Amino acid sequence: MRLSNLFFTTLRDDPAEAEMPSHRLLLRAGYVRQLGSGIYSLLPLGFRVNKRVEQIIREEMDRIGCQEMEMPVVHPADVWRASGRYDAIGPELGRFKDRNGRDMVLAMTHEEVVGLLLADIVRSYRQLPMMVYHFQTKWRDEPRARGGLIRVREFVMKDAYSIDRDEAGLDASYWAQHGAYVRIFERLGLDTIAVSSDVGMMGGSQAHEFMVLNPAGEDVLVLCEACGYAANRQIAIVPKPDSVPEAALPLEEVATPGTTTIASLAAFLGVGADRTAKAAFFMTGDGRLVTAIVRGDYDVNETKLVNAIQATGGMRPATIEEIKAAGMEPGYGSPIGAHDTLVVVDDLVARSANLVAGANREGFHYRNVNHGRDFTADIVTDLTNAQAGDRCPNCGEPVTLRNGIEVGNIFKLGTKYSDAAGATYLGEDGVAHKIVMGSYGIGVGRNVACIVEAHHDDKGIVWPAEVAPYAAHLVSIGSARDPKVDEAAERIHAFSIASGREILWERHRDC
């Protein structure tokens, strides 16, 4: 490719909106251009890198027996209604009507479609196991697109699906995919950590995320250097401190003006944050007001909360009006005397005596609040985020927290989607059995961004050889004075094309 013919332009200055090195460098070097929030065009340089990443993924998928195919990006909504995800997923799912008024969906992922294909194609145990995959555009209407290609709304994902007779077969497929992912990320030049993770909207019994450590990562990882424990903080369960047994003291209302935060309340009363109860309020997509209570020295883990209450349609912070309508006062709120709210209490609060909690009156709190006497939980469960220095659940040593960016995930789905589609196979015993599925995803563009995050210096991007858009950058200098310079460059350029590894040729005639 002659540089003079390349469809691109560079930027002299850093774009104001670029937060991360990968975002800044991909824009400045002419790899991508933004069309809208979380929506990017790949210019020829960016497209070539994407295709090289895809090829590495393709080779490793083929190596473990995956068959490449392609499924549609637009789905009839009834397919998603059958699995329950049409109503369970919030506004992230793209919904629209076709010209005949039929409800349609822009695919976030393809489990439902695979389930229907299995119901149509698989008949006998002799056809199993098998694995399929494709590269396809996805749409997820993220509320906070950020970081260039790190978090976008439209993207290409490799999603693979394993199809097995039973859980033992799923386990073998799951770990085959795990091994393929390790090789993929090694070839991409990415140092990854596989961490246990939440199954989220996918459902199922087990999941791992492959993470690249990065201070700008949105995920927080709980890691133990002593034993190798690794989990996303969304699901990490670590031992909590023992509560000191105390006799319940009489409830006492105290004036606490201007203390709408735990820090200000603890300072005003001269107590530790561990002697307070913190309330957080949420509305679920199905219209429930949720009051979550944790001890003041911890934070609410929203993933654990969503799983505990089995929220459908997503969850958002409650408004002031919604909180007041249930008899609670923002900044001074608690479940005491509240109504029409689902109360979810962390297990540490449930066994802690004589805490300070809101009195549901502006400028006032209660001392000596006790669960079971002054308010009752609808659900008691682990509800808190792990903190640095907490004990590892495996070995008891202190854990550390690191930020990470997810570059791939694997899920044991079980029979959720095959059940929804009515997909079964006839076993050796002559009886119909449920098909067991797994799902395995890698976002291509996010991996490109993470490669840049890991491989750049003060002069720009330093691509690993396997993903570089061109094998080399050939610069011919002074051909105006010596025509043989161009002749030699032309031969090298032609040879590179013939050998299947094209180079980028830039001519400077008058240098």
Image (cartoon, grey):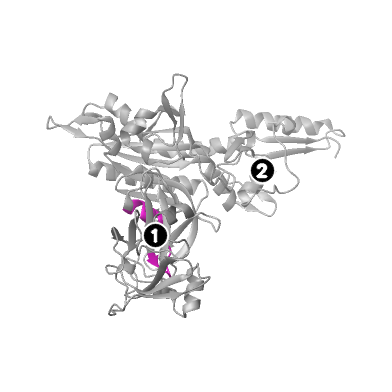
> Residue 52's spot in the image, x, y percent?
54, 37
> Mark 2: which secondary structure?
helix
Q: In the displayed image of the protein, which residue is found farthest to the left?
A: 429
Determine crowd level at label 1: few under 14, some 14-19, many 20+ residues with C-alpha closer than 10 A.
many
Q: Nearer the viewer, residue 185 or 109?
A: 109
Q: In the displayed image of the protein, which residue is found farthest to the top?
A: 100
> Mark 1: which secondary structure?
strand
Residue annotated with mark 1 = 230
Residue annotated with mark 2 = 27
> Residue 21's spot in the image, x, y percent?
63, 51
Q: Would residue 440 be found to the left or right of residue 218 on screen?
A: left
Amino acid bearing label 1: Ala
Q: Nearer the viewer, residue 268 or 404?
A: 268
Instruction: Tell me whether circle 2 and circle 1 mark residues in contact (CB < 8 Å).
Output: no
Task: Based on the picture, tell me whether residue 31 belongs to the magenta stretch.
Answer: no
Q: Nearer the viewer, residue 103 or 168?
A: 103
Q: Quadrant of the N terminus?
A: top right
* In the depicted structure, whether residue 284 falls above or below residue 277: above
Which range of residues does the magenta coloring cover?
A: 294-308
Q: Quadrant of the C terminus?
A: top right
For residue 245, what is the image quadrant? bottom left
The residue at 64%/44% (across/down) is 26
Q: Would residue 282 be found to the left or right of residue 119 on screen?
A: right
Q: Nearer the viewer, residue 319 or 37?
A: 319
> Residue 402's spot in the image, x, y percent?
48, 61
